[in-house]
Amino acid sequence: MATILLVEDNEMNRDMLSRRLERRGLKVLIAVDGAEGIMKAKKDLPDLILMDMSLPVVDGWEATKQLKALPETYQIPIIALTAHAMPEDEQRARQSGCDDFDTKPVEFSRLLDKIKALLETRKVAFPG
């Protein structure tokens, strides 16, 4: 079973996304800020991280940079999730180390396609 770490401070977004991902057969771990996201990524080594970029404690840009600098987590794909939808926002996310970028509100089928594609690059089976 593929494991996704969802780093999201908004409770409604967290609940909605985690439930939908779990219904697809994915195991979902939750972190509510960037510092907790870094800690859980290092401890649990998920197959993929969904990273909100506007987070308390440590923002998503900095959390991504730190994870991509660590030997144990640099290979974990990270998808940036943000309401900031300008081309420079995507560029900033990719410069921070994000492997892909998606905007909020999340269009679930589009996000799922991105998750599947990144899991395939790591040879992790997508359920269903």
Image (cartoon, grey):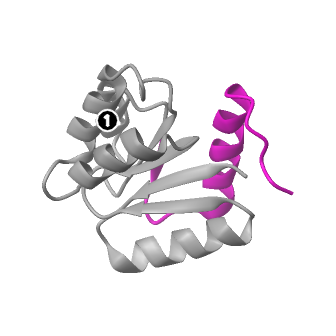
Q: For this view, does 31 lie left or right of residue 75? A: left
Residue 68 place in picture, x, y as percent: 35, 25
Q: Quadrant of the C terminus?
A: bottom right
Q: Residue furthest right?
A: 128
User: In percent of the image, x 13 and y 55: which residue is there?
Assistant: 57
Number of marks drawn: 1
Q: For this view, does 51 lie left or right of residue 23? A: left
Residue 29 place in picture, x, y as percent: 49, 60
| Relative vertical location of residue 101 with respect to residue 19 in this rendering, above or below | above
Indicate yes or no whether the magenta region holds residue 52: no
Indicate yes or no whether the magenta region holds residue 114: yes
Q: For this view, does 102 lie left or right of residue 33? A: right
Residue 31 place in picture, x, y as percent: 35, 60
Q: Residue furthest left?
A: 57
Given residues 59 and 82, the one toward you in this image is 59
User: In percent of the image, x 54 and y 69: which residue is there?
Assistant: 18
Badge 1 element: helix
User: In percent of the image, x 40 and y 44: which residue is there?
Assistant: 43
| Relative vertical location of residue 63 with respect to residue 121 in this rendering, above or below | below
Q: Amino acid at mark 1?
A: Thr
Residue beneath disc 1: 64
Residue 122 place in picture, x, y as percent: 67, 28
The image quarter in which residue 23 lies: bottom right
| Magenta extent | 101-128
The image quarter in which residue 93 lies: top left
User: In percent of the image, x 20 and y 48: which residue is there?
Assistant: 59
Graded by Cα atoms within 10 Å as few (under 14), some (14 to 19) or many (20 or more), the crowding at tag 1 reads many
